[in-house]
Image (cartoon, rainbow, N blue to C red):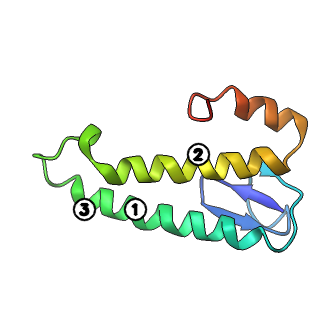
Amino acid sequence: MYISLNHKLVHADPHSSTWEYKVEVTKEVYPVFEKLFSQMEQLEFQNFLRSHLPYIPYHYDKDNDRVDLRLKKVFALIHEYTDDESKRFIEQLPLFR
């Protein structure tokens, strides 16, 4: 399967859209990616609504922390099922440490 973090999508076909990571997973793992991406979309929409309220600073907004947590989970899943080159790249990310 092919993961696009930019578009928050999982593809079976590498030619159907752009992707950043190739993962070797079973069909059981596919819904986990889908659920995490769906949750991220919902939280990002809530962040968009919150952004119009200037009295709540970004760094005090719990929804941002929730998005970051899900992104960490996605990277952990990708790290578990991807090739060595992608693993090394993910291990260098500040978010993954």
Would you say 22 lies left or right of 52 here? Answer: right
Residue located at (80% from left, 73% from top): 28
Figure quadrant of the N terminus: bottom right
Would you say 29 lies left or right of 95 here? Answer: right
Figure quadrant of the C terminus: top right
**Numbered disc 1: secondary structure:** helix
Residue located at (49% from left, 66% from top): 39
Spatial separation of the CA atoms under disc 1 and disc 2: 15 Å
Residue located at (31% from left, 63% from top): 46
**Numbered disc 2: secondary structure:** helix
Q: Nearer the viewer, mark 3 or mark 1?
A: 1
Q: How many marks?
A: 3
**First-in-chain label (1 vs 2):** 1
Q: Tell me the amino acid under the disc marked 3.
A: Leu
Residue located at (75% from left, 70% from top): 30
Q: Which mark is residue 49?
A: 3
- Residue wearing tag 2: 72
- Dot 2 alpha-carbon crowd within 10 angstroms: few under 14, some 14 to 19, many 20 or more: some
